[in-house]
Amino acid sequence: NDNASIWHGGASKNKPPLTETSEPTTPDQMFAALKLTAEQQSELDALEKERKAAEAKFRDFHGEKLKDAKNEFYAERKKKLRKVFTVEQWAIWSSFWNRPKP
């Protein structure tokens, strides 16, 4: 498990240990770095339910209709997430999801 290697100092894969200044590279690391309160976690869980329902609806759309529906949904989601997170948490979240993908 790559996470186990990272959290235990990288001994098994010779990776550098994760530090407070390291950028999260996995969703698990990113969520740990957010340090959500119970209330924030509850709000995020509700937003995730909304996202999953929207993703299911998107399967019925194609072309411009799909693009427009996703753009509208994710613009609203972004507004809602910014209300849930602190400025620091938003920086972690947006940096993680907007990073270049390998």
Image: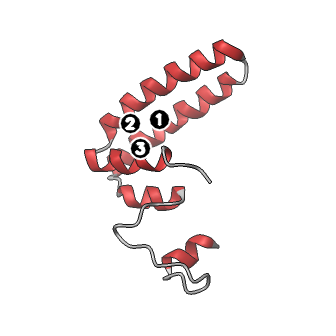
Q: Residue at x 44, y 25 (%)?
A: 75
User: In front of the other: label 1 or label 3?
Assistant: 3
In 3D space, how far apart are the residues under numbered discs 1 and 2 (Cα atoms)?
A: 8 Å
* Above or below, comparing residue 55 to residue 64 in the picture: below
Q: Residue at x 60, y 29 (%)?
A: 53
Which sits earlier in the primary sequence, circle 1 or circle 2?
A: 1
In 3D space, how far apart are the residues under numbered discs 2 and 3 (Cα atoms)?
A: 10 Å
Q: Which mark identifies residue 81? A: 2
Q: Secondary structure at mark 1?
A: helix
Q: Is residue 58 left or right of residue 39?
A: right
Q: Secondary structure at mark 2?
A: helix
Q: Which amino acid type is marked by label 3?
A: Ser
Q: Residue lying farthest bottom? A: 11
Residue 45 or 101: which is nearer the viewer?
101
Disc 2 to disc 3: CB gap under 8 Å: no
Q: Residue at x 64, y 73 (%)?
A: 1
- Could you say where residue 4 lies in the image, as x and y percent from the top left? 57, 76
In 3D space, how far apart are the residues under numbered discs 1 and 3 (Cα atoms)?
A: 16 Å
Which sits earlier in the primary sequence, circle 1 or circle 3?
A: 1
- Could you say where residue 38 lies in the image, as x and y percent from the top left? 35, 51
- Residue designated by label 3: 94
Q: Which mark identifies residue 16? A: none
Q: Which mark identifies residue 47? A: 1
Q: Which amino acid type is marked by label 2?
A: Leu
Q: Which amino acid type is marked by label 1?
A: Leu
Q: Secondary structure at mark 3?
A: helix
User: In front of the other: label 1 or label 2?
Assistant: 2
